[in-house]
Image: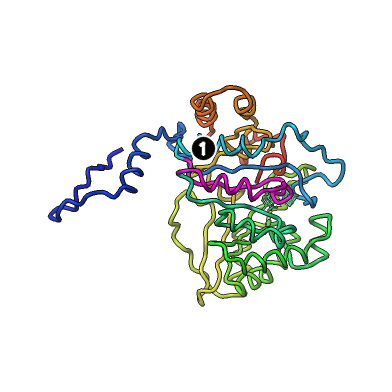
Amino acid sequence: MGTSWTGSGRKGSPARRLTVKEISMGERFNTIQRLIDRHGRVHTNLRLSVTDRCNIRCWYCMPHENVVFKPREEILTFEEIARFCQVMATLGVNKLRLTGGEPLVRSKLPNLIAALASISGIDDLALTTNGILLADQAQALRRAGLTRLNISLDTLSPETFHRLARREGLDQVLRGIDVACAVGFDKIRLNALSLRGVTEPEVVRLVTFARERNLEMRFIEFMPLDAENHWKVEQVLTGQEVLTLAQEAFGPLTPIERDDPSQPATDYAFADGRGRLGLINPVTQPFCHACNRLRLTADGKVRNCLFSSDDWNVQPLLRGNADDEQIAQLVRDCIAAKRPGHGMDEPQFLRPRDAMYQIGG
Ligand code: SAM
Ligand code: SF4
């Protein structure tokens, strides 16, 4: 790394001593063996699934009935997850996102958040939730150290919610959003899946709802990760179509330059500055070239891509006597095998055997 940590100032300005914090950051960067794959992508972002269980049954994610969940004894304990994250932090991972399944069905989740928040090197701790249990838990999550929250909200219509989620719950989600806003996270974002024939009438309503709360509304193209094999490319309402619908209602939107190039969304600003529109277009505009993510499933499989058919099982290492270097090597092997892209548009593309709730979205 070209950075000098000697503390010399700008040309012509007097040399300045580094602070203790700067020295320890420098030491950290100098000693880290970062997770760089064969395509030069530096992996700093880890998604942790804490459960494959869920309190609803979204059409685009889970089976309707007879879901076979992983046996409880296979699910990593909080201590095992925290140990894994500690090792990951020494390899340069600085962002964690908890997901599932529905992460808020996992009991005592704030205990895990507090453990993760205390890991040196982790500076961003986020969670994605369907919001149903959020009203009761938002305060405890914030107190434990959670900084950012994504709340899934596909619709404001109770009928459409029921059709998609195959359970009741919209009122609870809306209450969860209000409580989360009142608690005051660093950032709250609303996420809607973008599905042809369902999402078109929701776009303006959802964007209006988000703007009233000064939140970002993100639309994510439907991906072939549903458990019941419904996905067809024609069912994807594209990000471009969502943008057109939004511009028809709100006037021209201005793209916002990404401050983080690995950020998958293109964000747009409204003329009055209230709220934001975000578009994640994995189907029509894959962002694999900038992907810096790796994933840990609830039962301890490390994955380098949502669409990978391979995984690297770290559970035996976490439950055996493996040292940190053995865990790090397993992750390096996983990263080394990462393909350049998801290959969804290639004729030989095969859907992964696991659905979104089993991997962790
Ligand atoms: N249960 C939580 C929730 O719904 O927010 C967290 C897990 S969920 C798997 C994470 C995200 O994945 C949600 O925003 C959901 O809309 C998205 N998702 C699920 N299935 C999807 C699919 N087939 N294509 C695109 N996004 C999907
Ligand atoms: Fe549950 Fe989230 Fe999947 Fe919906 S998208 S079934 S809320 S895990």
**Image quadrant where residue 351 sits:** top right
Q: Would you say residue 112 sits in the magenta stretch? A: yes
**Image quadrant where residue 317 sits:** top right
Residue closest to the eye, 307 or 82 = 82
Question: Does residue 195 appear left or right of residue 98 in this picture?
Answer: right
The amino acid at mark 1 is Gln
Q: Position of residue 280 (x, y in %)?
A: 58, 54
| Furthest-bottom residue in this view | 272
The residue lying at 76 percent from left, 35 percent from top is 72
Task: Tell me the residue that label 1 is attached to.
Answer: 86
Label 1: which secondary element: helix
- How many labels sit on residues? 1
Magenta highlight range? 93-120
Question: Does residue 117 appear left or right of residue 15 in this picture?
Answer: right
In this view, 164 is above or below 212: above
Q: Would you say residue 355 sits in the magenta stretch? A: no
The residue lying at 42 percent from left, 35 percent from top is 34
The residue lying at 56 percent from left, 70 percent from top is 275
